[in-house]
Image (tube, rainbow, N blue to C red):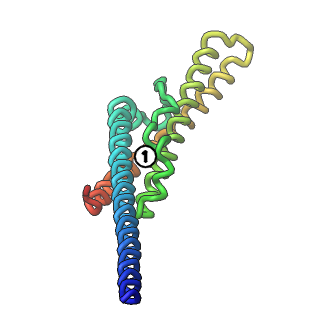
Amino acid sequence: MTANIADIAGIIQGIGSLAAVGTAVWIYARQYQDKKADDESEIRAFVEAIIEEVQAAWDGYCIEIHPALQALPVGQHFNVIYPVLNETFTIYDNGASIIGRIDDSELRRMIVNIYSLARGTISSFQLNNSMLAEHKQLLLLYRQPDRDSVLAAHANDLRDYAGKLKQRDEWITQAVPALLARANQWLASHPAR
């Protein structure tokens, strides 16, 4: 009879061990699913925020500067001081590590490209602002015998640079709608849970 109790105790202990392992596996699987859902939600929220940030920056650009660049005649310099800051992309700057977790390589490439273009455009406007300020200083203060040739050379540099601004404007004008369309397409294929 004692052998039967020991056998029963062993069977119960084995069942308990199996139940414990099964419970541990279930808890791990549940935690894994929860983590995966949290990661997917974080990535989705990031893409939504990128759309908002790009759209807001684009809207401001289209109101403030894009029409003036479009209307600029060829051969004329861009005589507008456009106050731009480098610290305009909070979402991208604070969440850039999430980009690598987006499961669409083309969308990842487009996000990096648009921010690279935007930063290059900001730098271009900052340089144009500096060149305009320098040109105004030259007009007011430069009184050397070569004044006319210096002013003409500087004005020519400004005209050449206006062409570069217009080129950047074309690039970003093509890139923004393409990014927004791709990001919205990605969101549609990754519904919120």
Residue 81 to residue 48: above or below: above
Residue 34: percent from left, percent from top: 34, 59
How many numbered discs sit on the rendered protein? 1
Q: Specify whether 47 is left or right of 132.
A: left
Callout 1: few (<14), some (14-19), or many (20+) C-alpha neighbours within 10 Å?
many
Residue in view at x 39 percent, y 58 percent: 35
Q: Position of residue 170 (x, y in %)?
A: 43, 46
In front of the other: 84 or 186: 186
Q: Residue at x 55, y 35 (%)?
A: 123
Q: Name the residue carrying label 1.
A: 172
Q: Where is 146 relative to 119, above or below? A: above
Residue 167 in view here:
no
Of the 4 image quadrants, the one containing the C terminus is bottom left
Q: Position of residue 139 (x, y in %)?
A: 60, 14
The spot of residue 187 in percent (x, y) is 29, 57
Residue 143 visible in rendering: yes
Q: Is residue 90 above or below residue 175?
A: above
Look at the image and tell me in which quarter the N terminus lies.
bottom left
Seen in the image, is 13 located left or right of residue 165?
left
- Report the front residue among 166 and 130: 130
> Which amino acid, by three-letter code, is at mark 1?
Ile
* Residue located farthest toward the right when viewing the structure as drawn: 145
Kindly state the secondary structure of the residue where label 1 is placed.
helix
View extreme (front): residue: 1
Between 141 and 111, the residue placed more toward the observer is 111
Judging depth in this view, the residue of 186 and 163 nearest the camera is: 186
- Whether residue 100 is situated above or below residue 150 in the rendered picture: below
Q: Which residue: 41% across, 35% down? A: 69
In this rendering, position of residue 157 left or right of residue 116? right
